[in-house]
Each structure stands twice: as structure tokens, then as C-alpha cells.
Amino acid sequence: MGGKSDIGLIGLAVMGQNLALNIESAGYQVAVYNRTPAITEEFMKERGVNRRLKPAYNLEEFVKVLELPRKIILMVKAGPPVDQVIEGLLPFLEEGDIIIDGGNSFYRDTERRARELKEKGIRFLGTGISGGEYGALYGPSIMPGGDESAYREVEEIFSKIAAQTPDGPCVSYLGGGPAGHYVKMVHNGIEYGVMELIAETYDLMRKGLGLSPAEMGEIFRKWNKEQQSYLLEITGEIMDREDPETGKPLIDLISDHASQKGTGKWTVQEALDLGVPVPTITAAVNARYLSAYKEMREEFYHLFKAAEGKKFLAGIDGERDLLKALEEGLFLATVIAYGEGMDLLQRASREYGYNLPLAEVARIWQDGCIIRSNLLKQIQRIYREKGETASIILSGEFSKEFAGRIGSLRWLVGLAAEAGIPLPAFSAALAYFDSLVAGELPANLIQAQRDYFGAHTYQRKDKEGTFHTEW
Ligand code: 6PG
């Protein structure tokens, strides 16, 4: 195949392969490279036939076939591999060339890389890409940040390959430095929160109501008609899947410890650093850690088994009401998880000067990404109508939902506590909401205690100033 390639892509794991094919389908010639040549060969043989893809087997050759300024997307594992690839590329690049890191890189790494590359005249875009394998192939949500002039060079390609909505393609320039990867990190934090809330809903339905996966599948599907949440949608499908070997619901055969690659943890660490409470997301990260305590949990289970297995449905208000409460409670807690993430973005934007366009963030999450849902339309509307410092939870349309439905969330958390079914994320979401609307919190006592043991002083309600008491 002749001519120079419009863009190059390094890293041919599934996400990289799919993204390369997506770009090619949008009408571009794509040069591809993978460190292990056999993977490139296999990709070309299996998926690259009759496509405008140009395989390269060393970095020099790869760089040479690219149109100027060169645009190179890295789809390699976050961490040191990104630095290694950049180092390998540098000797062959020229001033003005563009490197786009499309992985889940930690935003501080992106910040450092942007700085180092700028000194070398290379333009860098830290770009979050969400949507899993399917999204990469058919239209992801793309969250670019970094050198704006570089973004303008790839804007057309990104706009064509992103998920498309009536509001435009799911891509927008999010700001300088690591803004794109920061937004992707928080996207994943919200992803953790929503996944955990759905998992807790499932737990309540199976343990509290004794529902089968097939029954739950139907319920999730019904709820999702209104919410159009990708995570709810796939949960419905997961519930329906049978294990081909045993004929049993596959979900019943999957063990209950989940791992993680770190983006949820970073969100929580970052929130702690900035002093932004994200309790629902934090509970979700902790729940994954707890799930990994498999052996210890088994020991405890055998010790305390007596508490387990109470179907709380029996004798109370009936299955239908409980399902209604679950639907409402899940909705509110989900809004809280999004709200926590958006709050963190607001604070980071101010603190780090990213100037994040939050309505745009909500818009580009509307499709393609893992947390896509109708909720994002409402969030976008809130920001556009009330300004980007508005609180999602307490603003406009959601505040009415909270006023009308908070009783459901409260009821569920209470029932589950009595039945011994852990709802860490639901409970955290409820406590967060209650703290926000409490008026008085007991932090007066915290002030007094600090002053008692450490003379840390306190403020009073009735007069200005700083006070200390000899307790
Ligand atoms: C996405 C996902 C994707 C991936 C997470 C999984 O937006 O497409 O967030 O990036 O699924 O990295 O993260 P954990 O392994 O930490 O669950």
C-alpha cells in the first residue's frame, strides 16, 4: 500500500486493534506497530486484510511512514511501558509531532510526560478513551487533554471515530496538561460507584427476596427502559447468561472476588488530597478490597453463619413495594455517585486551573463510555442552565427526586442492616445525603475534643473569633 499514513497506532492488544480498525473505517490510513512482531502479523492476517493498514516492524520504519506532523496513538499498558515507548520513539520524531496516550495513565504521569515532551518540541495529548472493546471499535467516548494545537490536528479523526449522539460526537477538548486523563480517572471512579451500587442491588434481590438471576434480569431490563444506563443494561444480560457446561446461570458460578487496576483508587486518593468527600465511590473501592479478602471472609462466615440467610421479604410490605424502593434507591444513590465525581472535577478544575468544561464532560459521557446513561443528559442540562458550580444532587430536577424518594433509600438501608446484608455504597450514599441536608452536624463536638486534648482552638456560633477553653 502506497502513500503515507494519516496516523499511527502502537499497541495491538484488543483495544488497540479495535481502535485502529475504527480509525481505518472512518477513512484514514493507519500505520500499526506492536513490540511483538508476531502480534502485528496475526492482526494483519486475521483482521487487517483489505484494509488501509500499514504494518511496521520497528519504530523507525513506523515513524517514517507517517504523514507530517506525525500523529501517534499509544494504546499500551499504563505505567512504565508508556515511558518506554515514548523513549523509543523520540530519536525518530521531529518538532511538532504529536503523541497521544490513549491508555488509563495516572494523571500525574501525564503531567510529567507533557512537560518533558514539550521541552523536546513534541506535542502531547493525554487522552482518556472509554467504552471497552466494543466502544473502541464502534465509537468510544474520547477525553483529550494537553496541547490544544495538537488536538486541533486530530479533532477531525477523533470526531469521526467517537460515539455519535444528536448532541454531537462524544469528544471534546477538555483542557491543558493532564485534564483528559484526570477526567477519565474520575469517570472510572464513578464507574466503580455505579457498578457497586448495582451489585448491592443484586445482592439484596437474591438474598433478601430470593430472586433468581433470570427474574433479576427482567427487573434490571425493566428499570433500564427509563435510565438507559449501559451498566444496568449489561447487568440484565449477565443475569440471563447460562453456563454452557452446566446449564446453570453463569453468574452463580463466578467467584466473588473482584480485582482492579487502580483508577478507582486514584480517584479516592485524589479526592482525599483535595478534601472532596466521595463516600459512595470510596465505599465501592473498599468493597473491592473486601471482596479480595476471600479467605478471611470464609473464616468469618463459618463463625457467624447464624446471621445469614434471613429473607427479609417475609412478613413485610411485599415484594412489589420493595422492588419499587430498590429502583428508586438505586436511582438516587447513582445520582449521588455521579454527583461526587462531578464535585471532584469541579474542585480539581479550580485547584489545578484545568478550566474543565463540565457540561461538555457530561455531554461526551452521554454515549460510548461505560457510565453512559440518561442521567448525563440531566447533568448536562443542570450545568448549562445553572452554571458549572451547581451541585448535581441539590439542583433543580434531582432535588425534587430526592425529596420524593429519599424514604425508599432510607428504608432499604435499614432493612438490609437488619437482615445483615451489606450495602456499603448505598449506606455511604445515604449518609452523605443526610449529612448534606442535616443542618447541624456534630462537628462542634469534634472541635471541642480537639481543643480539649491539643488546645487546637474552636469557633463559636454566637461570636466571631478563635477560642480556647481550659477544659
Ligand atoms: C472504560 C473502562 C476501562 C476499564 C477499566 C477497568 O472506560 O472503558 O473504565 O478503562 O474497564 O480500566 O478498571 P478496573 O480494572 O480497575 O476495574
Image: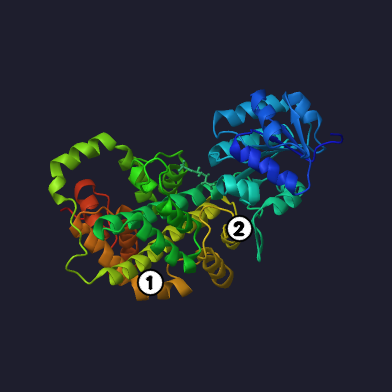
Q: Secondary structure under badge 2?
A: helix
Between discs 1 and 2, the one toward the N terminus: 2
Q: Going 75% across and 49% down the picture, which residue do you hit?
A: 26
Is residue 130 toward the left or the right of residue 22 in the image? left
Label drawn at residue 442: none
Q: Look at the numbered disc 2 and say if its residue's Cβ is closer than 8 Å to ligand 1.
A: no
Residue 179 seen by the camera: no
Identity of the amino acid at label 1? Phe
The furthest residue to the right = 2
Tag 2 residue: 364
Tag 1 residue: 402
Q: Going 20% across and 59% down the picture, which residue do you hit?
A: 311
Q: Going 40% across and 40% down the picture, which residue do you hit?
A: 245
Disc 2 crowd, CA 10 A, few/some/many (<14, 14-19, 20+): many
Snapshot colouring: rainbow
Where is residue 309 drawn, in percent x and y? 19, 53
Q: Nearer the viewer, residue 418 or 107?
A: 418
Is residue 415 toward the left or the right of residue 173 in the image? left
Q: Is 48 situated above or below 365? A: above
Q: What separation in Å lies between label 1 and label 2 (alpha carbons)? A: 26 Å
Q: Could you say which quadrant of the image residue 40 lies in? A: top right
Disc 1 crowd, CA 10 A, few/some/many (<14, 14-19, 20+): many
Q: Nearer the viewer, residue 347 or 328?
A: 328
Q: Nearer the viewer, residue 82 or 330?
A: 330
Q: How many marks?
A: 2
Identity of the amino acid at label 2? Ile
Is residue 28 toward the left or the right of residue 399 in the image? right
Where is residue 70 drawn, in percent x and y? 78, 37
Where is residue 84 drawn, in percent x and y? 62, 26
